[in-house]
Amino acid sequence: METQDQKSTSAKRGCRRLFKRSILFLILILVAIFCFLYFGKYDEGTRAGTVVRVSKKGVIFKTYEGQLNLQTFGAVKGSSPFMETFEFSVERKNDQIVKELESSSLTGERVNLRYYKRYMVFPWRGKTKYFIIAVERVEGMK
């Protein structure tokens, strides 16, 4: 027959085990949510225009940021010049894309930028949710 002390010790062990499993489950859920937000992409597309700016920004985390002039020429009623721009980031590993963007920015030629949009902004990745994955130069247009 179990004594009162043995019942109490057994209940405490069960409580600790449940608490540890709950904490582990919570950590796994948080890791899964972080991975989804960090690696997930929910939009892919193309924007066309001329590259206005490409720069390396940041105090602690240096990221490549840029701006594309969409050249709608006031087609959108009541739009301002700031609404006619597309802000984007380029991930650090894509040095070739940065070179192409800088080159097209200096020549003023029209480009098509292929991009994807992530769920969240992380400071070490970029200042926007939009990341350029390809630069297509439009032949014969400036």
Image (cartoon, helix red, strand yellow):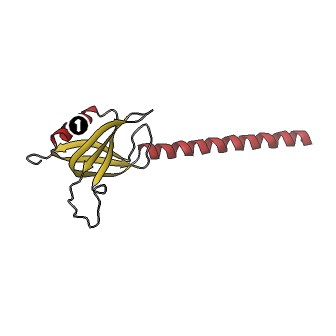
- 133 over 82 or under it: above or below: above
Q: Which of 85 and 37 is in front in this view?
A: 85
Q: Residue furthest bottom?
A: 77
Residue 63 appears in which quarter of the rendering? top left
Q: Where is residue 77 drawn, in percent x and y?
A: 26, 67
Residue pointed to by mark 1: 102
Name the residue: 40% across, 43% down.
Answer: 127
Q: Is residue 138 left or right of residue 34?
A: left
Q: For the residue marked with disc 1, what is the amino acid?
A: Glu
Q: Is residue 133 left or right of residue 138?
A: right
- Residue 116 % position (x, y): 32, 48
Q: How many badges with numbers are in the image?
A: 1
- Percent across and percent down for residue 114 are 25, 47
Query: Considering depth in this image, is 59 or 42 the residue closer to the camera?
Result: 59
**Vertical position of residue 17 compared to residue 46: above or below:** above
Give SS at disc 1. Answer: helix
Which residue is at a point 50% across and 44% down the rendered structure image?
34
Which of 137/80 is in front? 80
Report the side of 48 relative to 27 (left or right): left
Q: In this view, does 99 lie to the left or right of 11?
A: left
Q: Quadrant of residue 97?
A: top left
Residue 55 visible in rendering: yes
User: Is residue 138 depicted above or below 100 in this figure?
Assistant: below
Residue drawn 47% across the image and 43% down it: 35
Residue placed furthest toward the left: 140
